[in-house]
Image (cartoon, rainbow, N blue to C red):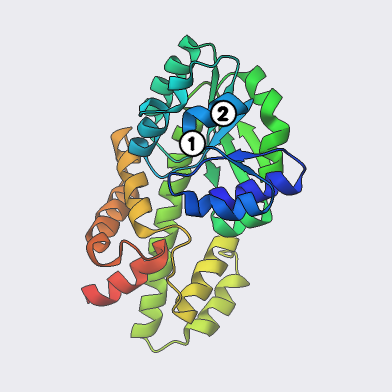
Amino acid sequence: MGIPMANSLIKSGYELTVYNRNPDKAQTLQDQGAVLAGSPAELMSKVDIVIIMVTDDKAINEIFEGANGLLSSQNQGKTIINMSTVSPGISIHMQALCSQQGNHYLDAPVSGSVKQATEATLVIIAGGDAQVFEKVKPVLETIGKLAIRFGDVAAGNRVKLIVNTFLAIQAQALAEAMRFAEDLQVDKSELMNVLNNSALASPFIKIKGEAIVRGNFKPAFSLNNIVKDLKLAEDIGLNYPLGKTALDSYQSAASNHGLEDIIGIFNALKNAN
């Protein structure tokens, strides 16, 4: 996700300094004119706005508070935008640490995957100070098609977990429909033609339905990641039948299909039967 997002910023004329824990992944951005930083601390010292896109709370802790982490630089007046899907609690913690140093923090997770990041059509869901949000909104709108502030710090994280709970339920429902079609010897391509022209149509259903038809389970958003997000949702109070059932289903599937795309739940349903 981070690489296509960075590409959008470069194409829009922003001067970019980048850091990746795996330097090889940042090389393609250097080839396009970005400057490589050797650590989060070095990055923090060179830029006014830091954008973070990593997998989980553990990675956020390392980037902020690890050796040569962002906060070890002791810089002031910076704005840190955490676009990762992480817990609301870690955003509250990091915002407090940033504020103590005289820096600003926004949580701004995104709705969308690699395709939307490449097309700069992500939906950005933010939490934090309203004035800080308005100041960086032009940057966010370079990465996505829509940026919305939902409230104070961690509001974006909460909304993102709502969105991903709905996403998980949709993917589970689509996989079950496609498995049911197989059971009844219904052509899955023709079923998708019906769904894509019905009131049920959506970009997500179209993309993931086509992936099932083609047998393409290469991860744009992995099954392991939806398990992580549903657990975060459970931690903040998810206690509804479909959400709880989806978490149980994906957790059960993760041991064999966790590295597949979220729609790999389709394969797990086959093996379960």
Residue name at image x 44 percent, y 69 percent: 218
The answer to whether residue 117 shows anywhere in this view is no
The residue wearing badge 2 is 150
Query: x, y percentage for residue 27?
Result: 56, 53
Query: x, y percentage for residue 112?
Result: 55, 52
Q: Quadrant of residue 149?
A: top right
**Circle 2: residue type:** Phe
Q: Nearer the viewer, residue 187 or 218?
A: 218
Q: Nearer the viewer, residue 167 or 232?
A: 232
The residue wearing badge 1 is 159
Residue name at image x 59 percent, y 20 percent: 78
Vertical position of residue 239 compared to residue 191: above or below: above
Residue name at image x 54 percent, y 37 percent: 37
Q: Earlier in the sequence, mark 1 or mark 2?
A: 2
Q: Are marks 1 and 2 in contact (CB under 8 Å)?
A: yes
C-alpha distance separating marks 1 and 2: 8 Å
Is 21 on the left-hand or right-hand side of 269?
right
Secondary structure under tag 2 reads: loop
Residue name at image x 43 percent, y 26 percent: 91
Binning the other alpha carbons within 10 Å of mark 2 as few (below 14), some (14 to 19) or many (20 upward) gives: some
**Circle 1: residue type:** Val
Residue 137: which numbered mark, if any?
none
Q: Nearer the viewer, residue 223 or 71?
A: 71
Query: x, y percentage for residue 96?
Result: 43, 15
The answer to whether residue 219 shows anywhere in this view is yes
Secondary structure under tag 1 reads: helix
Vertical position of residue 231 compared to residue 190: above or below: above
Is 131 on the left-hand or right-hand side of 235?
right
